[in-house]
Amino acid sequence: MRFMTDTWLVFSRAMRLSLRNPVWVILGLMQPILYLTLFGPLLEPVVNAPGFPPGTAWQVFVPGLLVQLAVFGAAFAGFGLIAEWRAGVVERMRVTPAGRGALLLGRVLRDVVVIVVQGAMLSVVAVVFFGLEAPIGSLIAGVAVVALLGGAFSALSYGAALKLKSEDSFAPVINGLLLPVLLLSGILLPMALAPGWLQTVADINPLTHVVDGVRAMYIDDLSSNEVWIGTAVTLGLLLVGVLYGSWVFRKESA
Amino acid sequence: MPETMIESRGLRRVYRTKKHEVEAVRGVDFTVERGEIVGFLGPNGAGKTTTLRMLTTLLEPTGGEAIVAGSDLRLDPVGVRRSIGYVAQSGSTDPEARAGEEIVDHARMYGIEAGTARGNGEALFEQLDLDGMWDRQCKTLSGGQRRRLDIAMGLVHQPRLIFLDEPSTGLDPQSRANLWEHIGRLRSDLDTTVFLTTHYMDEADVLCDRILVIDDGAIVAQGTPDELKRRVAGDSVVLDFGDQRSTVVVAELVSHLDGATDPAVEGTQVRFQVPDGASALPLLLRSMVERDVDATGVQVHRPTLDDVFLTMTGRSLRDEDQGATDRAAA
């Protein structure tokens, strides 16, 4: 009970600060919208290429953009925490009796809510302006899965940020990890088009399965194997992220 | 309410780096009673902040134990957190957030209900001269206002004991004097026990009932500012005369004075040191009258805590300020 109250307090404070500066929510959405407008049309003729998986160009492309939106937005959340740490906010909260996990989860929850809003907006734009066809339940489930994925990445990002405590060392770590992970997940083009070795490497990348899961949702329904695998992988990442993040928040030097 | 607010026994902390171990705090013993204002005085890197971070549960001690505000530091850190306030060197508020929101949120993390939190916060804003700052973004406050906001944050849950880490560092002289006044009032108005660290001699002298001098991780002296000053150098006395003859007479009188150092005569001036100038001087003046010698000027200088530190550690505090890095903050 106490834990819930603390989490809620940390969440509402963080949310209030984000809402005061909503320009970041819009800016975060700009990138996927640009991809949708400027890169999406290139895909339409490629759909007929040999080896292209089932589904329309948009059914393949939008899930990738959703994953990219969630992962990018969340992975950079740590920058905000470094600023908070430098301002003394983190330490000030750590001398209160509030649970250490709540200090993390409240912030993660804020990021999840932001991703839900951005993901919903992106889905609506894709359906209305670009003719994405998918069952409404799948659209909602897709946003839910990427929001949880975002939660995992934001928890990992907070943990890494609090461990490194400097933008100068945090930025290269995030950029260095993010680009290969995203490239190897087939977010822009499906990995089915890749040569064998690349497919093997991509299969090890958990994000590949999340992207495939959301694609499967859009094409069929929610009961295919890919959907279950994608969801399970997301939940697994979330668990790892939250455990790591809380461990760092609990540590004395944080 | 416990009468002893801090009881530290052998508290120590070792930092391990890749190559070697650094003993930042080498087993400190001290006691702080309820209602005291106690200062930890020492140069940067002496172990002040490390000790403070241990006492506030932010850092686990490598050895030793402590009872803080009635709770055992190791067995019940949450109990300690409930009863103490901590104002860190680095500040406490988000620059974008509004001052009033920050203090209410902070109070609520102690389980204080929103209405009470607001009431406590508003009362503190008034006491700390922050009227009208409630809806201001923290980044728009001046350095002195922000520091007072930090202190208000540390007090909003009405802790019995508050830790202030270098409260006046970075403030201009006027803001410092103003802050000292507020810290003095914490005890008189709110019955709060105050434990602070400083590397300013004048600050320790003005604020503290008792001072613990810490150097290189160990407490090298403790006592009231007056006790420390008396113990060390003694008062220096300077007497001026109209002629050379008197100086010879007075120098002879001084050499019979209890505890006085050998007088130094320079022209028509006699200088010496004596443990308690205020009580030694009337005696000396009386015997001067008996010998028919008149002084044209009398000065007594109390030693400063600077002198204390110099005698205790062989180094001046001011030297340490230059470019020293606080390894405790690492």
Image (tube, helix red, strand yellow):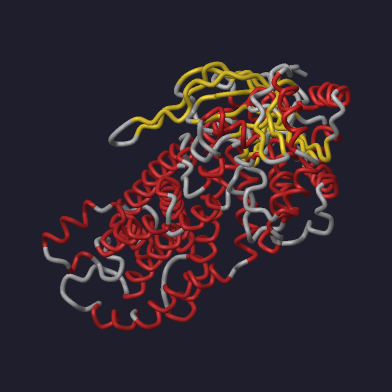
Q: Is residue B192 left or right of residue B20?
A: right
What percent of the width, then of the height, locates residue B222? 63, 23
| Residue lying at 62% horizontally and 39% vertically, measured from the top left | B198
Whether B160 is drawn above or below B206: the answer is: above
Q: Position of residue A228 (x, y in %)?
A: 35, 49
- Please determine whether, in this image, residue B122 is positioned above or below residue B206: below
Quick one: B49 or A237, which is closer to the camera? B49
The quadrant holding residue B191 is: top right
Report the front residue among B244 and B144: B244
Q: Quadrant of residue B17?
A: top left
Identify which residue, B120 or A100, lies in the foreground: B120
Residue lying farthest front?
Answer: B245
The answer to whether one can see residue B203 in this image is yes
Determine if residue B79 is in view: no
Total number of numbered labels?
Answer: 0
Residue under the point 81% across and 32% down: B187
Residue B125 horizontal side relative to residue B26, left or right: right
Q: Position of residue B230 (x, y in %)?
A: 69, 24
Residue appearing at x 35%, y 70% in the figure: A59
In the rendered image, which quarter is residue A192 located in?
bottom left
List x then y, in percent, for residue A188.
29, 70
Above or below residue B313? Residue B117 is below
Taking the image as shown, residue A28 lies to the left or right of residue B121, namely left
In the displayed structure, B308 sits above or below A43; it is above
